[in-house]
Amino acid sequence: MPDRIDNLTAAQEAAIPAHMDRWVEICTCTDDADWDMAVEAAKLIYEVVNVPFPSEVIRARNPVEAVRLGHRKARDIDGVGGKTSRRPTTSPPWPGTTSSLTSAGST
C-alpha cells in the first residue's frame, strides 16, 4: 500500500458523494444511543491503553450535560466538584513558547 495518495481514481471520486451522504446522516442522527455498545467500546479502548475501566459510567445526552454530571459526581466525591485549589500558572506550557496568561511584554 502506498504511503501517500496524490490522486484519486475515477471510481474513488465517484464514491465521494455517497460517503458524504453517509457521514452527514451519521453526524446528524438523533436516534437513541446504544449505551451497551458504547460501554463495550469504551472498555475495549481502556483495555488497549492498559488503563483500569471506571467503576461507574455516567450517561449523558450531550457534552454539556456530561460536564455537568461529571462535576456533580466529583462534588459528591470530594465536596468541591472536582475543582482544585491550584491557580493557573503564568509560565508557558513548554520552553520556547509564550502563555496566553502572561502579561503583554513578559514571558
Image (cartoon, rainbow, N blue to C red):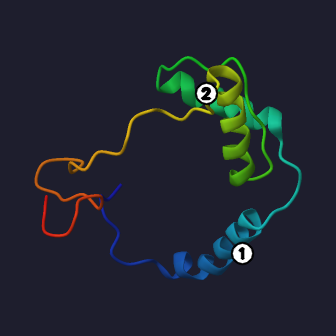
Kind of residue sitting beneath label 1: Asp
Vertical side of 15 occupied by 59: above or below: above
In the picture, the disc for residue 21 is: 1
Question: Which residue occupies 73% across, 39% down?
Answer: 69
Count the labels in the image.
2
Residue 76: x and y in percent read: 71, 24
Kind of residue sitting beneath label 2: Leu
Residue on which the image places disc 2: 44
Q: What element carries label 1?
A: helix
In the picture, the quarter occupied by the N terminus is: bottom left
Residue 96: x and y in percent read: 10, 55
Q: What element carries label 2?
A: helix
Q: Distance between the residues labelled 2 and 1?
A: 29 Å
Left or right: residue 90 versus residue 8 is left
Left or right: residue 85 versus residue 3 is right
Q: Which residue lies furthest to the right in this view?
A: 32
Residue 44: x and y in percent read: 61, 27
Vertical side of 27 occupied by 45: above or below: above
Left or right: residue 95 versus residue 28 is left
In the picture, the quarter occupied by the C terminus is: bottom left
